[in-house]
């Protein structure tokens, strides 16, 4: 799997993680919804040549998803 495909998979995992760990507090839940929407948008516009963004996705995934697995 190349880095672009990995980034798309990681975005799916990040979105699922945000949904499954939804806060009970309204303001935090709204922020999580906004984050999920931004990640969904990023998934649609991500280019295979955008290595800087792909690297940022990997770092976010490692910090927020892999760490809690």
Image (spheres, rainbow, N blue to C red):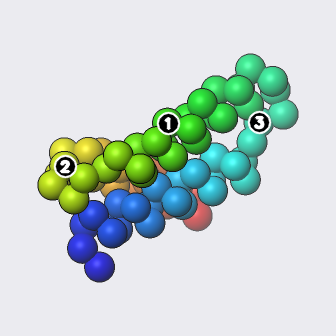
Question: Compared to 43, does 30 lie above or below?
Answer: above
Residue at image x 24%, y 73%?
A: 2
The dot on residue 27 is none
In the displayed structure image, the side of residue 64 where residue 24 appears, left or right = right
User: Of residues 64 and 9, which is closer to you in this image?
Assistant: 9
Earlier residue among tags 2 and 3: 3
Dot 1 falls on a residue whose secondary structure is: helix
For label 3, the residue is 23
Q: Helix, strand, or loop for circle 3?
A: loop
Q: Position of residue 35 (x, y in %)?
A: 55, 35
Q: Residues within 10 Å of mark 1 (few under 14, many from 20)?
A: few
Q: Answer yes or no: is residue 47 visible.
A: yes
Q: Specify which label sits upstream in the sequence, 3 or 1.
A: 3
In the picture as drawn, the residue positioned furthest to the bottom comes out as 1
Instruction: Quarter of the image for the N terminus: give it.
Output: bottom left
Q: Quadrant of the C terminus?
A: bottom right
Secondary element under disc 2, as helix, strand or loop, is: loop
**Residue 42 placed where, x, y %?**
40, 44
User: Alpha carbon of mark 1 to alpha carbon of mark 2: how far?
Assistant: 17 Å
Residue 59 in view in this figure: no
Within 10 Å of disc 3 (Cα), the crowding (few <14, some 14-19, many 20+) is: some
Residue 25 lies in what quarter of the image? top right
Q: Which residue is mark 1?
A: 38
Calculate the distance from the C-alpha at mark 3 to the C-alpha at mark 1: 18 Å
- Who's the residue at 40% across and 61% down the image? 8
Which residue in the protein does label 2 denote?
A: 50
- Residue 66, given in percent of the width and then of the height, sits at 49, 60
């Amino acid at each position: 799997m190349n880095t672009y495909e990995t980034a798309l998979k990681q975005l799916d995992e990040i979105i699922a993680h945000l949904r499954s760990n939804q806060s009970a507090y309204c303001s935090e839940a709204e922020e999580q919804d906004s984050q999920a929407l931004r990640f969904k948008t990023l998934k649609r516009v991500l280019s295979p040549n955008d290595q800087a963004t792909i690297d940022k996705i990997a770092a976010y995934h490692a910090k927020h998803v892999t760490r809690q697995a």
